[in-house]
Image (cartoon, rainbow, N blue to C red):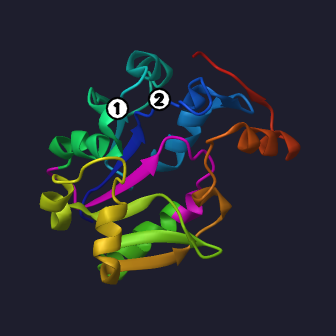
């Protein structure tokens, strides 16, 4: 099987909440660790976390996990810079998951189904779909789109590639975790209403 890597985009400033949402603890585990956990598996050869804001704090939080932390000093220029910061580390990869650091509920079965579809269907881009909404992670044949990714600008990230090459996208059935992220106090309150214990971590 050709190598699968994962890039976790975790360079945002969490400006809407006013503190680092990636260090929120949900039932005793930080959001960023929850977001990474489904990708720490034998079928994924390497996991790279792209940090920007509070990179040292994130590196400490992730110490001991089998992954590499890359510091994107241009993170304020948008998500595209974090995607591009990972490119030098992807030369040997065939497929690359791009996961967002604030999505703590992506299911293992979704990752399994995406890998299976990627190889069985020789798919260029695989996306989970939940109730008609495109979710994360994205699994992409990275070598096919390297030149275009290198030219991305701003905060659109891989959406521009997905929209431009919509005919290349294969969708699988996702679950709520593929679209649920933590962007506001409303999402945090929803988690508490569902019985989760949510506490602020180190800021």
How much space separates mark 1 and mark 2, taking CA atoms? 8 Å
Mark 2 is surrounded, within 10 Å at the Cα level, by few (under 14), some (14 to 19) or many (20 or more) other residues, namely: some
Place of residue 32 in the rendered image (x, y in percent of width and height, measured from the top left):
53, 35
In this picture, which residue range is highlighted in magenta? 91-110
What residue do we see at 19% from left, 42% from top? Answer: 89
Question: Which quadrant would the C terminus be assigned to in this image?
Answer: top right
Q: Determine the secondary structure under disc 1.
A: helix
Reading the image, the residue beneath label 2 is 13
**Residue 159 at x, y = what percent?**
37, 62
Mark number displayed over residue 76: 1
97 relative position to 132: left or right: left
Q: Looking at the picture, tell me which residue is in the foreground, 202 or 12.
A: 12
CB under 8 Å between discs 1 and 2: yes
Mark 1 or 2, nearer chain start: 2
| Residue 132 x, y percent position in the rendering | 60, 76
Classify residue 33 as left or right of residue 150. right
């Amino acid at each position: 099987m050709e190598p699968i890597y994962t890039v976790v985009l975790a360079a945002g400033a969490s400006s809407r909440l006013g503190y680092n949402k990636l260090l929120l603890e949900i039932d005793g585990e930080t959001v960023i660790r929850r977001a990474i956990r489904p990708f720490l598996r034998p079928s994924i050869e390497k996991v790279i976390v792209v940090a920007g804001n509070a990179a040292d704090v994130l590196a400490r939080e992730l110490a001991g996990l089998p992954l590499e932390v890359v510091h994107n000093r241009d993170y304020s220029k948008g998500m595209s810079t974090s995607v591009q910061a990972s490119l030098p580390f992807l030369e040997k990869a065939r497929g690359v998951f791009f996961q967002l650091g604030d999505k703590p509920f992506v299911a293992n079965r979704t990752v399994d189904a995406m890998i299976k579809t990627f190889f069985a269907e020789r798919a260029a881009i695989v996306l989970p779909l939940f109730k008609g909404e495109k979710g994360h992670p994205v699994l992409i044949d990275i070598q096919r789109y390297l030149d275009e990714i290198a030219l991305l600008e701003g905060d659109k990230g891989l959406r521009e590639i997905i929209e431009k090459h919509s005919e290349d996208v294969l969708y699988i059935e996702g679950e709520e975790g593929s679209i649920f992220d933590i962007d506001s106090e409303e999402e945090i309150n929803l988690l508490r209403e569902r019985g989760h214990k949510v506490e602020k971590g180190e800021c």
